[in-house]
Amino acid sequence: MKRPTNPDKDLIKETEEEKPEIAVAPVDETAEITSIQEFLELKKLQNRVLGKMLEKMNETENQNNTINK
């Protein structure tokens, strides 16, 4: 009697053979990506700071409105 082959093992062998080579990005590209990430983080921080400033302005305006009424 013939032993059946395991298709999962065959599939694993095929995928191992088809693994793409890991490409290392040139230094310029990684520096560019890093600068983009830093830019996005700075924008997030800027938005948070502006949001806090607007909240404080709204609080003072609301306090002024209640005093004037």
Image (cartoon, rainbow, N blue to C red):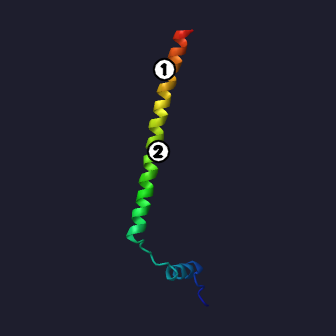
Q: Indicate the amino acid at tag 2.
A: Lys
x and y percentages locating residue 29 in the rendered image: 43, 67
Relative to 4, is 50 on the left or the right?
Answer: left
Residue visible at 44% across and 75% down in the picture = 23
Relative to 47, is 6 on the left or the right?
Answer: right
Report the Cα–Cα distance between label 1 and label 2.
25 Å
x and y percentages locating residue 66 in the rendered image: 54, 12
Residue visible at 41% across and 65% down in the picture = 30
- Give the number of the disc on residue 4: none
How many C-alpha atoms fall within 10 Å of the one at disc 1: few (<14), some, or many (≥20)?
Answer: few
Q: Secondary structure at mark 1?
A: helix
Q: Is residue 10 above or below residue 32?
A: below
Q: Is residue 8 above or below residue 42?
A: below
Which quadrant of the rendered structure holds the N terminus?
Answer: bottom right
Which residue lies under the disc numbered 2? 44
Residue visible at 40% across and 68% down in the picture = 28
Residue visible at 42% across and 62% down in the picture = 32
Q: Indicate the amino acid at tag 1.
A: Thr
Q: Nearer the viewer, residue 15 or 31?
A: 31
How many C-alpha atoms fall within 10 Å of the one at disc 2: few (<14), some, or many (≥20)?
Answer: few
The quadrant in which residue 2 appears is bottom right
Q: Secondary structure at mark 2?
A: helix
x and y percentages locating residue 45 in the rendered image: 43, 42
Q: Is residue 53 above or below residue 6?
A: above
Q: Which numbered disc, 1 or 2, marks the residue closer to the eye?
A: 1
x and y percentages locating residue 40 in the rendered image: 46, 51
Which quadrant of the rendered structure holds the C terminus?
Answer: top right
Instruction: Say whether disc 1 or disc 2 marks the residue closer to the N-terminus.
Output: 2
Which residue lies under the disc numbered 1? 60
